[in-house]
């Protein structure tokens, strides 16, 4: 599950970068970036909770 969140986040960031630089897809591209950041934050929070 931990690798899955990072994999999804990386894929979404790559898709965001492609869409941002290659196409003008509007707000959808920024939504992908937000989802990727949220995925990484969830992982960091879960890891921090496990360490305590």
Image: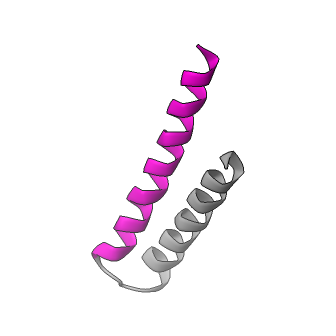
In the shown orientation, is residue 1 left or right of residue 15? Answer: right
**Prevailing SS of the magenta stretch:** helix
Name the one closer to the observer, 17 or 28.
28
Q: Give the residue furthest to the top.
A: 52
Residue 45 x/y as whole percent? 50, 31
Residues drawn in magenta:
27-52
- For residue 27, above or below residue 48: below
Residue 44 x/y as whole percent? 55, 34
Residue 28, quarter of the rendered image: bottom left
- For residue 13, above or below residue 48: below
Name the one closer to the observer, 11 or 47.
47
Q: Residue at x 36, y 84 (%)?
A: 24
In the image, is residue 32 part of the stretch drawn in magenta?
Answer: yes
Residue 32, quarter of the rendered image: bottom left
The quadrant the C terminus occupies is top right
Residue 47 x/y as whole percent? 60, 29
- The figure's colour scheme reads one colour
């Amino acid at each position: 599950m931990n690798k899955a969140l990072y994999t999804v986040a990386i894929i979404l960031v790559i898709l965001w970068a492609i869409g941002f630089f290659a196409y003008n897809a509007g707000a959808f591209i920024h939504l992908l970036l937000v989802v990727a950041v949220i995925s990484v934050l969830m992982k960091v929070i879960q890891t921090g909770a496990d360490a305590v």
